[in-house]
Amino acid sequence: PASGNSQIDFSVGASSSVSIQLFDVTGRRIKTIFNNDVQAGKHTAEFSGLDKFADGSYFYKMEVKQNNKIVFSETKRLMIVK
């Protein structure tokens, strides 16, 4: 469960563009959590403002691009509980 502030840890094997978007249960994008170019290694996407959203299930989608090609895409559920 997440509340006001949270983080997502991830790692990439090569220099990449990483995007993490937050969606509600209807699939509407409601927040960009992370959108940066990163070097190979471990990283943390820290984000705040979740207390502005109602309690419940949300989804985040992480996409990793290398040379403008998506090399990894994953969607996971995120529970917001205050």
Image: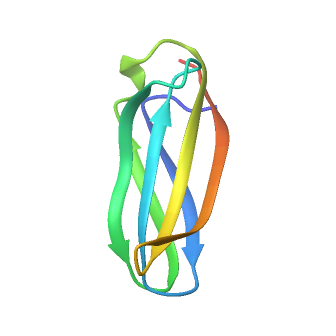
> Residue 80, located in which quarter of the rendered image?
top right
Looking at the image, residue 2 lies above or below residue 44 = above
Q: Is residue 11 left or right of residue 52?
A: right
Q: How is the image coloured?
A: rainbow
Residue 25: which quarter of the image?
Answer: top right
- Report whether 33 appears left or right of 63: left
Front residue of 49/38: it is 38
Vertical relation: 31 (above or below) 12 = above
Position in image of residue 31 (x %, y %): 36, 34
35 displayed left or right of 45: left
Q: Residue at x 49, y 86 (%)?
A: 40
All told, the count of numbered labels is: 0
Specify the quadrant that holds the N terminus: top right
Q: Position of residue 36 (x, y in %)?
A: 32, 65
Q: Residue furthest top?
A: 54
Give the x, y percent position of residue 11. 57, 74
Image coordinates for residue 29, horizontal then vertical, percent: 42, 30
Quadrant hosting residue 55: top right
Q: Residue at x 59, y 34 (%)?
A: 59
Q: Residue at 34% x, 57% y: name it.
A: 35
The image shows residue 14, relative to residue 4, as above or below, that is below
Q: Nearer the viewer, residue 20 or 71?
A: 71
